Image (spheres, rainbow, N blue to C red):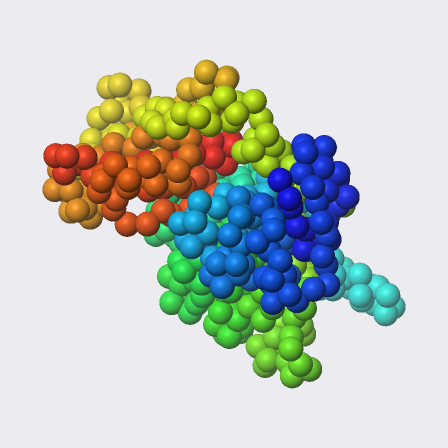
Amino acid sequence: MKVLLIDTNHPLLQTGLEKLGCVCDEDYVSSKLEIETKINKYNGIVIRSRFDIDKQFLDKATNLKFIARVGAGLESIDVEYATKNGIQLISAPEGNRNAVGEHALGMILALFNNLKKADLEIRNGKWLREANRGLELEGKTIGLIGYGNMGKAFAKKLKGFDVEVICYDIKSSVGDENCKQVSLQELQEKTDVLSLHTPFNELSHKMVNSNFINNFKKPFHLINTARGSAVVTNDLVEALQNKKVLGACLDVLEYEKLSFENLFENDTLPEAFNYLINAENVLLSPHIAGWTKESKIKLAQTIVDKVETLFYSKVSEITEPKLKRVTGIGGLFFKTNNPKKLKEWYKSHLGFNVDDWGATFWWKTSEGKKASTQWSPFENETSYFSPSTKDYMFNYRVDNLVELLQKLKEEKVTIVGEIEEYEYGKFGWILDPEGNKIELWEPIDSAFL
């Protein structure tokens, strides 16, 4: 395959792709329009965030088999359109999750112990011990929003601090031994320190606003190592002023350009940003939470490994002639009058390890990899099973959701909605001949570990 590299990365990435058999070209200076004129010659493209991969670009990329982004998210890519065109999308959250976890922990410890303030004071001849009396993490509740690769890495770092770690996520059964999954309401009731680990999407955009902040029962500290667009800065400043937010650790800001390489287009600083840079209870860093020497290597290797798995491994060669369809049961979902009461019955009499979403059963694939199946009772009024009128829905595990849905469409199977992609996999929905809604899941099991 011919692969175009348009952002500089660790040399390991190009070397690794070439060892697989790829022919790699580099172009770090041409404009997006210039690259569009030649992208039809390539089967793969490797990017960070130099420019958007949009519909116009994809229409020119007639031979593209994959887009690899050397980072955690895919926000610079028109995911829906690329998926419809059968292009494999590759990201590498596994490569910098440890760096993000360490950075988030370092920021909150520095803020709690006034390290930036105390260091500057000493350099100016001030020795102020009482004025720099700090806080301890022990005994506090750390609330995480988003529990994928980054959230899990941060929770793992918190294990030795004698804290309660809870999380809220739009997908069920993502909690583990390091973190208890709870409802958003419970998270807002208990949290002392809130840490954001959400991807860029419509749900996370401007999520932390005045209404969201005021729903917290206690004043809290905020950590954001995710995306700057998740926090409305004006509302955060107002909350800092009225002590609803006690302090903030911000590695990202809503003023960042999409490329993350620059902050502002000009020298005019927003009033809210002026407040942040002068506030002693605010710690800032320039989008470097996942930016370590080690993560640069890990990110590159992750991309190489995933390209190998998708296009060069013996397994893919063996299975390519015959499309794998369903590979296992991913979940059993059903309606009930009282989900809470029913879960307690299963916990008491059958030993189910239940949480807010149901129960998770872990098992191993034939290759010895960990995998899970979810058992979840839903309220009778749920619309999640729509347009089916049945009281149940099955989730089935699949290997290649995009290819399978294309095949099912050719076979005149009814497709419901569009593919949705999260850190823990891709989801699609179909109807069987009796009107049962079926959820198809291409899992990323490593996201739950």
126 vs 25, left or right, is right
Count of numbered circles on the image: 0
150 or 337, which is in the foreground?
A: 150
At 25% from the left and 46% from the top, the residue drawn is: 416
At 55% from the left and 68% from the top, the residue drawn is: 254
66 or 50, which is in the foreground?
A: 66
Residue 339's place in the image compared with 123, above or below, is: above
Is residue 145 at least partly visible in the picture? no
Measured as percent of width and height from the top left, residue 210 is found at 42, 69
281 vs 243, left or right, is right
At 36% from the left and 47% from the top, the residue drawn is: 419
At 83% from the left and 67% from the top, the residue drawn is: 126
Which image quarter is the N terminus in?
Answer: top right
403 vs 264, left or right, is left
Is residue 385 at least partly visible in the picture? yes
| Picture quadrant where residue 149 is located | top right
Residue extending farthest bottom: 268
303 or 311, which is in the foreground?
A: 311
Measured as percent of width and height from the top left, residue 89 is found at 51, 45
Residue 189's place in the image compared with 230, above or below, is: above
Measured as percent of width and height from the top left, residue 319 is found at 46, 24
Measured as percent of width and height from the top left, residue 318 is found at 50, 21
